Amino acid sequence: MASLSPPTHDHPRRCETSTATHLCLAVRSLIFRFLGSIFASSGVHQQQQFRGKPASMNRQKSLSRDIGHAAAETYLVTRLTFTLLRYLGVGYRWYTRLLALACYALLLMPGFLQVAYYYFFSSQVRRSIVYGDQPRNRLDLYLPTNISGPKSVVVFVTGGAWIIGYKAWGSLLGLQLAERDIIVACLDYRNFPQGTISDMVKDVSQGVSFVCNLIARYGGDPNRIYLTGQSAGAHISSCVLLEQAIKESRGENTTWSVSQIKAYFGLSGGYNLFNLVDHFHNRGLYRSIFLSIMEGEESFEQFSPEVRIKDPRNREAGSLLPPIKLFHGTSDLSIPSDASINFVEALKGVGAEAEVILYEGKSHTDLFLQDPLRGGKDDLFDHMVAVIHADAGDEEALAKYALAPPRRRLVPEFLLWLARHISPF
């Protein structure tokens, strides 16, 4: 069982004034309360053991327990977040954005309900598989119906401003990729204030290790894994990938290898914290919160892949990185597309294979939500699938995908138009 102690880090947060000291103590107290609530409400985490093939494993928890567990976690995180915001003195801007988020979700609800039905009732979804001993160390697996031969695997890390991320946010991507004979593993990880950035990186790295070592039991190919992240998830997963490459370049022992990652896909991510802190502050993710999430400004370099890859000590790690493809909308207000452009330039500067693909007029959520919910042709999705099947040398899958009928629409166009204009992202 995980310890009930709050996360500790090598870089202490700055509490230079009496007010800041009280703030830090308040945050620590809130983390204690959160962890205490988690353990009081859910008891001991029941880990699923891999004894034999998946067909011989016990079935997943009942639907009512799944829903109850998700509801309890959501309630606790939401309650704690509002309490934390009051401690930090967050004003009207955050509350108006939360209201906009609620309206945004309501407009897209027709699509969300269809995806939720698949998530809870499909036999192809394996929910809440435990991959570590910390709270929220769980993942969901989306399995193709075609089980012939080992499949390519996408490990997806969801976004959520490092605060509201959840593994189920990747269910639409999981559904659509599984239809293309690709296994998808959506990782959950500790969000703030349950954890800070180093906890998130540690969790995701452990989840990737779990997939690399055990995905073969579900029909996946452990040497054809694609690491993917969106928004904050792109930032965290890129930190994980670079950290792993640095460790391997220094000869350190690791539980998984960068060579198992065939490619990295980053969607609408930010990779340089120095360039983002003021931008986020102006957007409503205030500096006080952002510094708490990132463990103080002194940790920015460690968790800024764009900056870290330029360090001469890490140049050898660049040669170990897989091909990196970054996707970004030019109308992204949450994280400007320059974030992806600059990271690709830094990667190319150390000899890594990197490419940025820009989508004219697309917003922060268009690429990940509105476009997939719209159905029909989706340039980003088509590009990812084509790369994955081409790497596998699967001509049959490429031909089958080319002849596949257009994906069906899940949300009427008018609701998508309204959602785009009310989106807080």
Image (cartoon, rainbow, N blue to C red):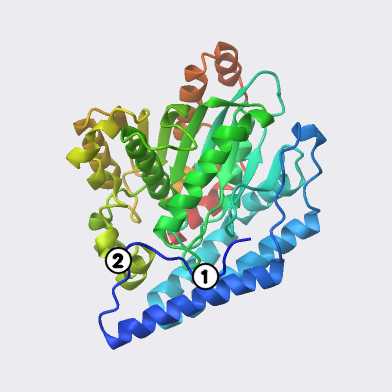
Give the labeled residue for mark 2. Answer: 296
Label 2 crowd bin: few (<14), some (14–19), many (20+), radius 10 Å:
some
Residue 212 picture location, percent across and down: 54, 33
Q: CA distance from mark 2 to mark 1?
A: 20 Å
**How many marks can you see?**
2
Which labelled disc corresponds to residue 228? none
**271 up-or-down from 217: above or below:** below
Residue 323 sits in quarter: top left
Residue 11 appears in view: yes
Frontmost residue, 220 versus 410? 220
Q: Is residue 43 left or right of residue 255?
A: right
Residue 351 sits in quarter: top left
Give the labeled residue for mark 1. Answer: 5
Residue 342 picture location, percent across and down: 23, 42
Q: Amino acid type of disc 2? A: Gly
Q: Residue at x 26, y 84 (%)?
A: 17
Q: Residue at x 38, y 74 (%)?
A: 93
**201 up-or-down from 26: above or below:** above
Which badge, 2 or 1, comes first in the chain's sequence? 1
**Mark nearer the viewer, 2 or 1:** 1
**Quadrant the N terminus occupies:** bottom right
Q: Amino acid type of disc 1? A: Ser
Does dot 2 land on a helix, a strand or a loop? loop
Residue 91 appears in view: no
**Quadrant the C terminus occupies:** bottom left
Residue 9 picture location, percent across and down: 38, 63
Q: Residue at x 59, y 29 (%)?
A: 182
Label 1 crowd bin: few (<14), some (14–19), many (20+), radius 10 Å:
few
